[in-house]
Amino acid sequence: MRDLLNLNVRLYAALFLFAIYLFSGLAEAKSASEIVAESDKQMRGDASYTVATMNIIRPDWTRSMSMKSWTKGQDLSLVLVTAPAKDKGSASLKRQKEMWNWIPSIERVIKIAPSMLSQSWMGSDFTNDDLINQSSIVVDYDHKLIEEQTIDGDDSYVIDAIAKADAPVVWSKVRLWISKESYLQRKVEFYDEFDDLVNTMETFDVKQMGGRLIATRMTMTPKDKPGNRTEMITHEAQFDFDIGDAFFSQSQMKALRD
């Protein structure tokens, strides 16, 4: 009888410990939306500054641009072209839901309407939405964890982001491969309203830069344009520094040169 009682005690203890383990695992598990938000924070922080080269690659030619970009939170971003000379000073600005381009050659600010988000940014394979409105993936989409896969040796969550009704976005669905370790986006597929794949972004050369891991090279490849791709290479990066909201203004966008 005592042996049976001891067995029951051990059984209940084991079940209790298992329940604690299971509850702990569920409590620690992140939702798909939390994973996407953590990824966005990892890649941009509370504030970010990067220096990069964009190479627009076509079957018969290649064009390169140097650029700097600043972000603050999810609502403020500014991108400045620093070379070549003919494009130097061109800039793109986002404040909350509004976006503008500054074209110094004609000294004109052009407001980016929602219908213009799908247009190419500076002739590249990135759209205005991809480059200026990056944090939209957090706030304008619902997220669902699909599976887990390994990308470039990196165990990753596969998450579908489905555009919310009436959201001012280009892509109706975005599929993301997010590293389980670093929370970097290792691959992203962009789909139109017919659920057809349009563009694929892949990231490479993950390195420490600015005190955190970042993917220092990314490529955007259109599905239906063989031989076309745009490559972005990051040379410098800083994160989580003080920068005022006033920096992200039309007057600053016009004044910046290098």
Image (tube, helix red, strand yellow):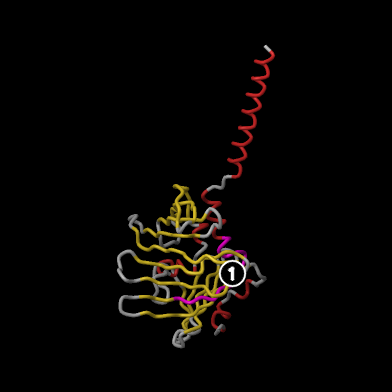
Quick one: 130 or 251, which is closer to the camera? Answer: 130
Say which quarter of the image contains residue 45. Answer: bottom right
Residue at image position (52%, 60%) is 184
Residue 77's place in the image compared with 102, above or below, is above
Asked if residue 164 shows in the view, the reply is no
Of 92 and 211, the residue lying toward us: 211
Return the residue found at the far front. 3
Rendered-image quadrant of the N terminus: top right
Residue 179 vertical placement versus 57 (above, below):
above
Direction top: furthest residue: 1
Q: Which residue is outermost to the right?
A: 2
Q: Position of residue 128 (x, y in %)?
A: 44, 70
Residue position marked by numbered label 1 in the rendering:
209
Please provide the residue range marked out in magenta: 41-54
Residue 11, x across and y down, in percent? 63, 24
- The answer to if 42 sits in the magenta stretch is yes
SS for dot 1: strand
In the picture, the quarter occupied by the C terminus is bottom right
Name which residue lies at 46% across and 55% down.
177
Q: Position of residue 104 (x, y in %)?
A: 48, 85
Residue 126 in sight from this viewpoint = yes
Q: Quadrant of residue 60?
A: bottom left
Q: Which of the 4 image quarters holds residue 225?
A: bottom left
Residue drawn at (30%, 65%), measured in percent from left and top?
Answer: 224
User: Badge 1, how many Cα within 10 Å: few under 14, some, many 20+?
Assistant: some
Q: Is residue 199 magenta?
A: no
Residue type (three-letter) at the residue carrying disc 1:
Met
Number of numbered callouts drawn = 1
Q: x%, y% of residue 89?
A: 50, 84
